[in-house]
Amino acid sequence: MPKKTLTFALMDAPYESANLTTAFRILDAAARRGHNINVFAYEGAAALAFTRQSPHPNPVHGKNVAEENHPTTKDQVTALLAVAAKNGGKVDWVNCGMCVDERGVNEFVPGTRRGSPADFQVFTDSSDNTLVIPTK
Amino acid sequence: MAKKSLNIVETAYRAVMEEQDDTILWLLAAMQGAGGAHTVVLRGNAVNYAIAGQGAPGLTVGEWKQTQAPRMDRDVADLIENRKIPVYVVEEDLAERGIASDELVSGVELLSRRALPGLFAEYEIVSHW
Amino acid sequence: MNNYLLIESRDPFESNDVGYYYELSKGLVEAGNEVTLFLVQNGVLAARPSAHSVALSALCQSGVKVLTDDFSLRERGISKLAEGIVAAPIDVIVDHLAAGHKTLWH
């Protein structure tokens, strides 16, 4: 299948919804196939690429930080950019600027950028398809 | 040329007081300003957005007072009148909620749930919000 | 004729809005389209044979292709699926998107 450009809108904040696990699985599958990917990270999703996330131990399960190896979405975003590049695709990950400001999450994974709804409009008009994953 | 986009909005009153907007209606208004070609269908609980005269006073916490409490009916009217975004409301969802059509802001168009599949064909992008 | 992928993340045990989405998929088929309903997350709970899976099997009979995310099934320990429902990998979603099929999430 020829390479396509696919746009995704995400809204869920880290650690609040199963939607993000599915979203990252879809993004990973698209990246492995070499598709170009646009992501508009809106509302809570503006925190997905926040670099100040840090993993923690799990005292309930008796695991230290290393043993728990707690996922952080910033690492998942970083890994997505890497797997896309490895397979010849580009990722344009935009964090909605006002969403970033109100949440105070204005330090992003390198390779992602601040943007606005105008970017999402450009994404949808210029890409081959768009999937909105809304929040409840 | 913008792709014609149908936006089915069903989540209602999520963070509306905090954001002083419905974040999806706001997003679509912004995208329309950036050259979009959007249409809105209000379904499920979101049909309540079209009721004229709604709106709570701002939140108060101690001495902190919200001064710009949202008014969803005005935002719906704004989409129609100023942003030129057609707004449909699913009539069965109104009826299920005991809402009469004369309670709605002017300019919304009633749409039967049965007509949704046919409407999809007119748009290049269809999204649920 | 258009192709549609409808992704359902919700289940009928917790949400009474799932019925709308199932009916939408049937309505799109009746309007002459090809429709795949892809259950993910708790949406797969309805795929286990139960009183609620009857609606999904009926959708299969009416021409909707009903798939369930294999990851979500394993996560929930679901090994037996109701009649007509098939497990599938997440790549199916990427296939549909890449093919230009209108793709919606509920």
Image (cartoon, grey):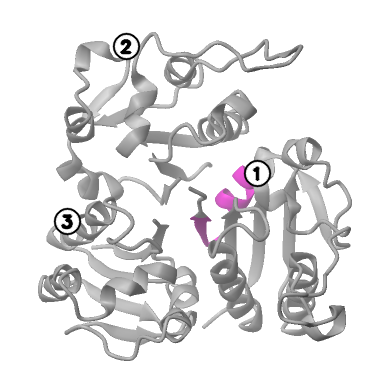
Observer-nearest residue: B57 or C22?
Answer: B57
How many residues crowd around disc 1 within 10 Å: few (fewer than 14), some, or many (20 or more)?
A: many
**Same subunit under labels 2 and 3?**
no
In this picture, which residue range is highlighted in magenta? A120-132
Horizontal side, residue B79 vs residue A38: left or right = left
Kind of residue sitting beneath label 2: Ser
**What is the count of numbered marks?**
3
Residue C99: quarter of image: bottom left
* Residue at the extreme bottom of the image, as rendered: C79
Question: Which residue is located at x 56 percent, y 73 percent?
Answer: A26
Residue C1: quarter of image: bottom left
Kind of residue sitting beneath label 3: Gly
Task: Give the secondary structure at mark 3.
Answer: helix
Alpha-carbon distance for marks 2 and 3?
A: 29 Å
Residue B43 in sight from this viewpoint: no
Q: Is residue A49 above or below residue C49?
A: above
Kind of residue sitting beneath label 1: Glu
Task: Give the secondary structure at mark 1.
Answer: helix
**What residue sits right under mark 3 in the picture?**
C27
Chain to which mark 1 belongs: A
**What residue sits right under mark 2 in the picture?**
B106
Question: Which residue is located at x 22 percent, y 55 percent?
Answer: C19
**What residue sits right under mark 1 in the picture?**
A43
Chain to which mark 3 belongs: C
